[in-house]
Image (tube, grey):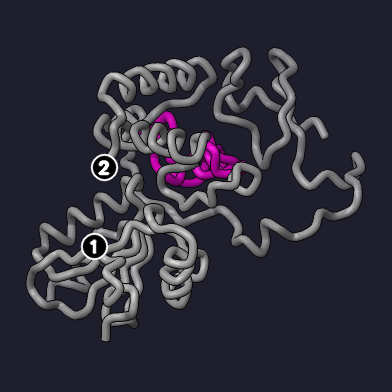
Amino acid sequence: MSNISKADVEKLYTRLNRDAEKSGYHTNPDFEHTNDLVRGLLINEKRYGYWACPCRLASGDKEEDLDIICPCDYRDQDIEEYGACYCGLYVSESVFEGKKGVEPIPERRPSVEERTKPEQGPITLSSLPIPVWRCRVCGYLCARDGPPGVCPICKAKKERFERFV
Amino acid sequence: MLNDAIDSMTMMHVKGKDKGDIILYALSTCVWCKKTKKLLTELGVDYHYVYVDLLEGSEQSKVLDDMKRHNPICSFPTLVIDDKTCIIGYKEEKIREALVK
């Protein structure tokens, strides 16, 4: 089905794994699962030109697929809520340590209709749609529903974050 | 009452025990689809499957329209049994329950 070599898969796997560990994430320790996904990413890179999520149907239009380019926009929320991202490439600390398994999870990506809704008016500081969190250790700021499990910059744990805006 | 897509040879057929008309909408790169397919094969049931990502243009739209009737957001895998029961995602227990009768 594909002419992606085993060496290519291993190379990308090593890179993704190293990058994940560096920034406080973990790839799925289920090697077969992760390997299949990495192969899927390489297949998608070949046919679309970018790493569309292997478990979602890409349109082939990069602009339209930006939210599902791996790591996708939904990864962190899914890891937080379910212990793994949609395809299961990235997992939480407890899954990584084998305390919890990886289960298939519901699709968080909004429907095409919702995704293509026209944008609302300008955002002001008092009407931010997403809160801003600050790492009290290094000052790293991020806008997301909750603080990350680990600060990607200084590796401080979640409890060291405060709501900034 | 298999649909047009099967007639037009868009779908692949895996032979096995007749447990109704089983259609698996899948992606060729999806791990959960792969697991679902493996489970169906292990259960030895007769089923059709289609890799929607390998279809193009109108052929793909036609299959997606068909899929939408059961799963409006068209996520994968989507398993449809007898055009009425729909199991979205690799829900191993649910699939076993529905097919081991």
Describe residue A99's horizontal placement relative to residue A91 as left or right. left
Instruction: Specify whether disc 1 shares its chain with disc 2.
Output: no
**Which residue is drawn at the image coordinates 60% and 42% (left, top)?**
A62
Q: Report the span colored magenta.
A: A66-95
Q: Is residue A1 magenta?
A: no
Question: What is the count of numbered marks?
Answer: 2
In the image, residue A112 sits, relative to residue A59, either above or below, namely: below
Q: Which of the 4 image quarters holds residue B88?
A: bottom left
**Which residue is drawn at the image coordinates 35% and 47% (left, top)?**
B30
Residue receiving disc 1 = B93
Describe residue B84's horizontal placement relative to residue A64 as left or right. left
Describe residue B32's horizontal placement relative to residue B41 as left or right. right
Q: Position of residue B52 (x, y in %)?
A: 38, 58
- Residue furthest to the bottom in view is B1
Residue receiving disc 2 = A1
Q: Amino acid at mark 2?
A: Met
